Amino acid sequence: MNELLGSRIKALRVANELTQEQIADKIGVSRQRYARIENGDNNITLEILSKIASVLNVTVGDITRVLDEKPAVAYRAGEEHTSSKEIFDMLDLFYANKHLYTKLQERNEK
């Protein structure tokens, strides 16, 4: 979990063209501690998470959303913990979307 949050924070920091040192200064921690947060080595408190979100001009939810996306990310990464039910659910969704797309194309042709 810490690794997911850390990688999300790092991605947002890079997108904002900020260094680790700049963020660490703004939230009141050492650069080393901030680096450990990005690497997932340190637990992150809600207080620190709120400060980071403020510096990055996002909400805490924008950062923690990555925790909800983990199963899809794990599947794309090829992890073996994906159950056959999850795979069948994905296939069902794919075919449902394909069917809907075909129906819309037929309607547009008329």
Image (cartoon, grey):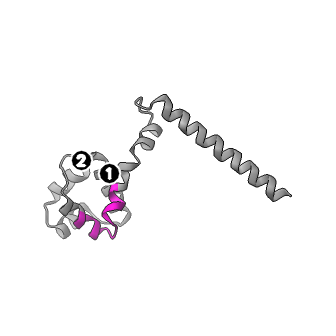
> Circle 1 sits on which residue?
7
Query: Based on the displayed image, in which of its 4 quarters is residue 58 positioned?
Result: bottom left
* Mark 1 residue type: Ser
Majority SS type along the magenta span: helix
Above or below 106: residue 57: below
Q: Position of residue 78 (x, y in %)?
A: 45, 34
Q: Position of residue 81 (x, y in %)?
A: 40, 30
Q: Where is residue 66 in the image (x, y as percent from the top left)?
A: 37, 52
> Circle 2 sits on which residue?
40
- Name the residue located 36 percent from the left edge and 61 percent from the top edge: 62
- Residue 51 is one of the magenta-drawn residues: yes
Helix, strand or loop under label 1: helix
> In the rendered structure, which segment of residues is drawn in magenta?
50-64
Q: How many marks?
A: 2
Asked whether 105 or 15 is in front, the reply is: 105
Name the side, left or right, on which 69 lies relative to 91. Answer: left
